[in-house]
Image: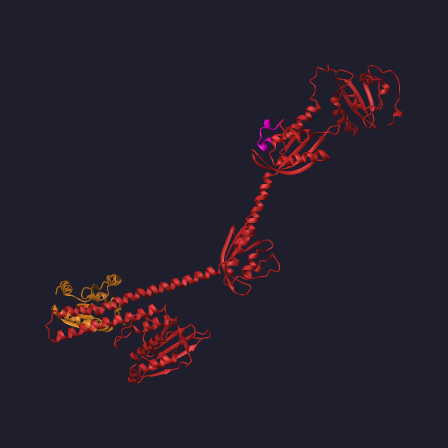
């Protein structure tokens, strides 16, 4: 609307008419009646063009200013107002009309002083703001600007006091230098300056030590300027990020620890995505087993296909069973896993299954540990323990037999010596007893010689420096030595040893072995046929050599007892002490060999000596 | 009265026989150097020997084997045949094992001496 539309002058106002005016969309009077002019204390002609708000008591202005746009949008509104030129309260009513807003002003009927005036809108707003300030979790503060680098706390909310742990009286009315500790103080003063200079809100993060502890806050400060453009106040908001920062720090440290742990461990870590059935591998997998992964994650088969077929059931099947048919959170197994080069590693695998609320496996995180070396060491240890156990048992048996066999002739000697005292010297019985006493003592001596022979083998076993021994040559020496005995019974020794065959060992031991086996063959030959002994050697595919000494003698029931046990005898008719085969075994074993026997009563006996490898 | 001496060591048998004779143990003394032979002889007799001295450590058939072989004939032997193990072994295990045989009346360490012979005579109430 234009000023030219106003109708100056007009009829004098009827006193009963309410004060009235019409407003344009800027809140200015287009025209008003005389009652209004009277209330406002000005001529009717002066009303046009005046801002309605400017005509009211300044304290009420903001409320009305807030209502005008609403009325413009079609709301009928009213509120109590005061007028500078008239005492008391008036009801201001805004009525939306086409293209304009009608205004009515009516005195409130009760005396203006009487009614309990509704809370002033400012007070109400302040109360509401207060509630907001005090209940908000962020720190809010207002600083009064007193000069360059001089600021004083005018307002802080409850969050400020709660978070810093400072009491209100140590903050309110205090200079910032008294409240904010260094180094945050210098930072903050700089930022305040910047905000005032630029007129813009500034942001920064500061870390300060307050009575409640170390706090990290994101600070945001806005300068507030007065009409003259002077900055009077700074309004600040601080968002406390201490916990968030601590959590981030803890996460960073934890991640770092995990990274180092990954580097420190030689295990192959994996993450099985159950739904996709893929495995994501840590570095260790390639390193431990030599696989170059073209992709990561890999299909599940990258693992399952390389589990040893004999272990697959209790490993692959068991894992899938545990994952899909149980609710167990853990799985572990030891199994063989093929390396990229085809060799087998012994692996100890341990995993943790992550399950959803219904117990279904979602992921499994685990680690494969290569325990091959430990396993091998364990096996070596087990073998060693077994050997020691066997050796100990042998020694016990040895002690038992020796004490028994040593004691037998000694007991006889004691008996004969006692008998001598009761017999008449010179009698035939006395002479016989004396002879038996001598015989018994000679046997004691024999046993002691045996003992010496046995102990020397056992004792020297560790000291033997192996030399290549030409077997055919040694056998020749032994047959030469036994030539008379062999000829005496018409025996034939067929030496079928390759002339060049040499075995690592000691010549004296091979000599003893052949000697004992040949004398045994002579001793236990079958009387009904001439003795024939065949000595041969065969070399296996693995380079091991099997020496065989086979005779056609009486044989014995080899299944009944250990033929190689000390003082074990199978024959009663032929003198023998039962030490020959014991020595054969001891000598063979001290050179790393093994001895076995097979025999059939009436047909003959074959001794087989197995040596791991021939001399180079 | 018949007495069996079973020991693969002929000197042992000779010594035991001489000591028994010196203590005037009467009757027939049969010596065997093989337990198998002794077993055959025993089983052929209508009446078992009154007394047996048995060595333990013998080739082919040991004293233990001999006792095991007698097990089926125990009813015929108990009370009529006393068996003493006569051994040079001092092993406790052997003494324990001897106790498990009902047929064994005792275990004597070689050599047999006068007191032991008299004790046995008393038990037989010869």
Q: How many marks?
A: 0
Taking A610 as reference, is A296 left or right?
right
- Kindly indicate which chain is depicted in orange in the rendered structure: B
Q: Is residue A257 above or below residue A106?
A: below
Which quarter of the rendering shows the N terminus of chain A?
A: top right
Q: Main secondary structure of the magenta part?
A: helix
| Residue B95, image quadrant | bottom left
- Kindly indicate which chain is depicted in red in the rendered structure: A
Q: Is residue A168 above or below residue A614?
A: above
- The percent position of residue A156, horizontal first and vertical second, equals 63, 29
Is A148 in the magenta?
no
Taking A104 as reference, is A278 left or right?
left
- Residue A491 visible from this viewpoint: yes
- The percent position of residue B32, horizontal first and vertical second, equals 21, 73
Residue in the foreground of this view, choosing between A176 and A280? A176
- The percent position of residue B1, horizontal first and vertical second, equals 14, 69
Residue in the foreground of this view, choosing between A556 and A144? A144
Q: Residue at x 71, y 15 (%)?
A: A113
Q: Residue at x 61, y 28 (%)?
A: A171
- The percent position of residue A369, horizontal first and vertical second, equals 51, 57
Which quarter of the rendering shows the C terminus of chain A?
A: bottom left
| Residue A165, image quadrant | top right
- Residue B44 visible from this viewpoint: no
Q: Is residue A299 above or below residue A177?
A: below
Taking B118 as reference, is A512 left or right?
right
Residue in the foreground of this view, choosing between B79 and A174? A174
Is A162 in the magenta?
yes
What's drawn in magenta, residue-wise? A158-172
Taking A411 as reference, is A355 left or right?
right
| Residue A23, image quadrant | top right
């Amino acid at each position: 609307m234009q000023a030219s539309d106003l109708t100056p002058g007009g009829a004098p106002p009827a006193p009963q008419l309410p004060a009235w005016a019409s407003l344009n969309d800027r809140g200015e009077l287009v025209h008003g009646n005389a009652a209004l002019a009277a209330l406002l204390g000005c001529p009717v002609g002066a009303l046009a063009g005046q801002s309605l708000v400017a005509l009211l008591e300044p304290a009420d202005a903001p409320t009305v200013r807030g209502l005008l746009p609403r009325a413009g949008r079609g709301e009928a509104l009213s509120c109590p107002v005061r007028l500078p030129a008239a005492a008391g309260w008036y009801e201001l009513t805004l009525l939306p009309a086409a293209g304009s807003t009608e205004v009515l002003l009516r005195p409130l009927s009760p005396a203006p002083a009487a009614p309990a005036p509704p809370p002033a809108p400012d007070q109400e707003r302040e109360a509401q703001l207060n509630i907001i300030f005090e209940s908000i979790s962020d720190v809010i503060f207002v600083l009064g600007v007193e000069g360059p680098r001089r600021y004083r706390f005018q307002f802080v909310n409850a969050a400020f006091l709660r978070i810093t742990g400072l009491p209100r009286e140590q903050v309110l009315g205090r200079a910032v230098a008294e409240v904010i500790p260094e180094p945050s103080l210098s930072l903050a003063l700089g930022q305040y300056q910047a905000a005032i200079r630029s007129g813009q809100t500034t942001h920064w993060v500061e870390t300060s030590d307050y009575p409640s502890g170390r706090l990290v806050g994101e600070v945001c400060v806005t300068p507030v300027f007065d009409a003259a453009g002077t900055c009077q106040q700074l309004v600040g908001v601080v968002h406390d990020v201490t916990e968030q920062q601590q959590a981030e720090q803890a996460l960073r440290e934890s991640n770092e620890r995990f990274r180092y742990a990954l580097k420190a461990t030689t295990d192959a870590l994996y993450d099985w995505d159950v739904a996709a059935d893929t495995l994501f591998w840590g570095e260790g997998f390639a390193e431990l087993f030599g696989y170059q992964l073209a992709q990561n994650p890999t299909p599940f088969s990258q693992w399952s296909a390389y589990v040893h077929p004999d272990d697959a059931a209790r490993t692959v099947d068991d894992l899938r069973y545990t994952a899909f048919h149980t609710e167990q959170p853990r799985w572990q197994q030891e199994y063989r896993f093929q390396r990229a080069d085809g060799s087998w590693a012994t692996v100890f695998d341990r995993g943790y299954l992550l399950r959803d609320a219904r117990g279904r496996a979602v992921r499994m995180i685990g680690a494969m540990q290569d325990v091959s070396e430990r396993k091998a060491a364990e096996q070596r240890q087990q073998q060693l323990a077994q050997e020691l156990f066997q050796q100990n048992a042998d020694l016990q048996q040895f002690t038992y037999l020796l004490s028994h066999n040593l004691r037998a002739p000694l007991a006889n000697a004691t008996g004969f010596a006692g008998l001598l005292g009761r017999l008449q010297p010179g009698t035939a019985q006395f002479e016989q007893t004396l002879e038996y006493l001598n015989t018994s003592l000679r046997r004691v001596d024999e046993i002691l010689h045996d003992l010496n022979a046995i102990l020397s083998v056992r004792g020297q076993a560790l000291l033997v420096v192996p030399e290549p021994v030409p077997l055919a040559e040694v056998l020749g020496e032994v047959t030469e030595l036994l030539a008379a005995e062999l000829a005496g019974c018409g025996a034939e020794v067929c030496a079928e040893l390759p002339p060049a065959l040499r075995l690592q060992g000691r010549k004296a031991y091979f000599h003893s072995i052949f000697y004992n086996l040949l004398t045994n063959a002579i001793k236990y030959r079958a009387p009904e046929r001439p003795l024939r002994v065949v000595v041969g050697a065969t070399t296996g595919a693995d380079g091991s050599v099997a020496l065989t000494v086979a005779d056609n003698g009486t044989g014995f029931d080899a299944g009944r007892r250990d033929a190689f046990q000390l003082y074990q005898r199978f024959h009663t008719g032929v003198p023998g002490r039962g030490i020959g085969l014991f020595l054969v075994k001891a000598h063979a074993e001290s050179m790393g060999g093994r001895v076995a026997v097979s025999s059939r009563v009436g047909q003959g006996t074959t001794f087989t000596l197995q040596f791991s490898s021939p001399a180079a | 009265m018949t007495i069996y001496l079973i020991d693969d060591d002929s000197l042992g048998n000779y010594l035991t026989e001489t000591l028994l004779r010196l203590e005037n143990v009467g009757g027939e003394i049969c010596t065997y150097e093989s337990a198998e032979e002794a077993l055959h002889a025993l089983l052929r007799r209508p009446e078992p020997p009154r007394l047996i001295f048995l060595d333990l450590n013998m080739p082919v058939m040991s004293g233990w084997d001999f006792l095991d072989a007698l097990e089926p004939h125990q009813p015929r032997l108990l009370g009529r045949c006393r068996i003493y193990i006569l051994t040079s072994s001092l092993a406790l295990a052997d003494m324990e094992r001897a106790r498990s045989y009902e047929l064994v009346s005792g275990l004597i360490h070689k050599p047999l001496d006068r007191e032991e012979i008299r004790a046995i005579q008393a038990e037989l109430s010869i």
